[in-house]
């Protein structure tokens, strides 16, 4: 690697979440640095509506997020969309928590009750709707408190304004630790393997910087292997600097919960069955009208060819 030209890369994420632990492992473990890449990661600034907006305006080289934005844009008629080349999460990372203990939990208990789904992106709510319908519950049978970002959603739940809340980690573990909520369902287990989150870039970047993308993907693949081989406490300790306000034991619990349900892939390949699983969810929620070609949204060659 001594002769490899170093390259600076700007990566923007939609939010800071333990769901993206593989990204932080790659950075903290030096896996990208070993590939000659100086990677910086920042949460999407308020100036941009979402990560793809930041990407299209040149604020990032690579973004993390859902392939759903590319699929929706293609369904609306966009000729080209940001393409996804390495998978981060292969399951939904959100959890449904209730105010009252549910033993056993029955999905029909949500009917008529107040539910807070997070609103930062369409996919989490679409995935929750998919699980509801599978259990015979119509989303319109719920009393939804829409449009709440994460902090406001937590505040509203703590004030007693909802009976259920839909959260990622580490917020789920933090709320559970207070005794104010009870875990009733894991959407990752409910909806199986889907192409939930991945790295994406523009056509131009992928074509003109192919060697850089290969190095980025190879380093990330090695981080995924390290994540798979490490226990939750070790992983939690390594990514703790990214979560300065989270207790180490709760961060380890969050990592263990994600590992136990197979949230993170063994390698970064984003294959078509998982892509179609995501489209099933988007179509069921009415977010897209037609299936979009895998080849339009995904560039699989980088992960397939990466030495892992």
Image (cartoon, grey):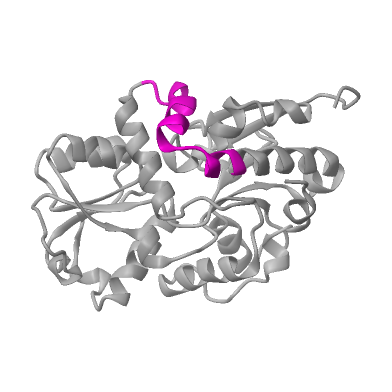
Residue 41 placed where, x, y %? 58, 29
Residue at horizontal 64%, vertical 51%? 268
Residue at horizontal 12%, vertical 66%? 112
Q: Is residue 213 left or right of residue 223?
A: right
**Picture quadrant of residue 212:** top right
Q: Is residue 13 left or right of residue 127?
A: right
Residue 284 placed where, x, y %? 42, 74
Q: Is residue 255 left or right of residue 64?
A: left
Prevailing secondary structure class for the magenta stretch in the rendered image: helix
Residue 44 placed where, x, y %? 52, 34
Give the vertical position of 261 relative to 211 (above or below): below
Q: Quadrant of the N terminus?
A: top right
Residue segment shown in magenta: 225-244
Residue at horizontal 43%, vertical 51%? 121
Instruction: Count how many numbered circles sit on residues in the image.
Output: 0
**Picture quadrant of residue 127:** bottom left
Residue 59 placed where, x, y %? 65, 32
Residue at horizontal 55%, vertical 28%? 42
The stretch drawn in magenta includes residue 239: yes
């Amino acid at each position: 690697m001594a002769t490899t030209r170093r390259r600076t890369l700007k990566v923007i994420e939609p939010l800071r979440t333990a769901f993206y632990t593989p990204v932080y492992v790659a950075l903290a473990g030096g896996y990208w640095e070993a590939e000659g890449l100086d990677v910086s990661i920042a949460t999407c600034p308020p100036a941009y509506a979402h990560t793809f907006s930041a990407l299209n305006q040149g604020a990032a080289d690579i973004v993390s997020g859902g392939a759903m934005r590319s699929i929706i844009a293609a369904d609306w008629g966009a000729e080209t969309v940001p393409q996804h080349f390495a998978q981060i999460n292969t399951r939904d990372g959100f959890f449904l928590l209730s105010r009252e203990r549910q033993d056993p939990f029955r999905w029909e208990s949500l009917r008529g009750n107040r539910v807070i789904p997070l609103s930062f992106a369409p996919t989490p709510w679409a995935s929750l709707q998919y699980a509801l319908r599978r259990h015979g519950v119509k989303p319109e049978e719920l009393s939804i408190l829409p449009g709440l970002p994460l902090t406001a959603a937590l505040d509203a739940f703590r004030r007693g304004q909802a009976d259920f809340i839909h959260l990622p980690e580490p917020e789920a573990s933090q709320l559970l630790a207070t005794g104010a909520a009870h875990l009733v369902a894991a959407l990752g287990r409910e909806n199986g393997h889907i192409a939930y989150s991945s790295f994406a870039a523009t056509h131009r970047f992928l074509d003109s910087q192919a060697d850089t993308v290969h190095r980025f993907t190879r380093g990330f693949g090695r981080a995924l292997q390290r994540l798979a081989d490490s226990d939750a406490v070790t992983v939690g300790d390594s990514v703790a600097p990214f979560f300065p306000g989270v207790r180490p034991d709760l961060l380890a619990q969050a990592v263990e919960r994600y590992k136990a349900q197979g949230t993170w892939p063994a390698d970064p390949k984003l294959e078509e069955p998982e892509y179609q699983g995501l489209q099933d969810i988007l179509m069921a929620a009415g977010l897209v009208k037609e299936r979009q070609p895998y080849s339009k949204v995904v560039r699989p060659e980088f992960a397939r060819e990466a030495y892992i």
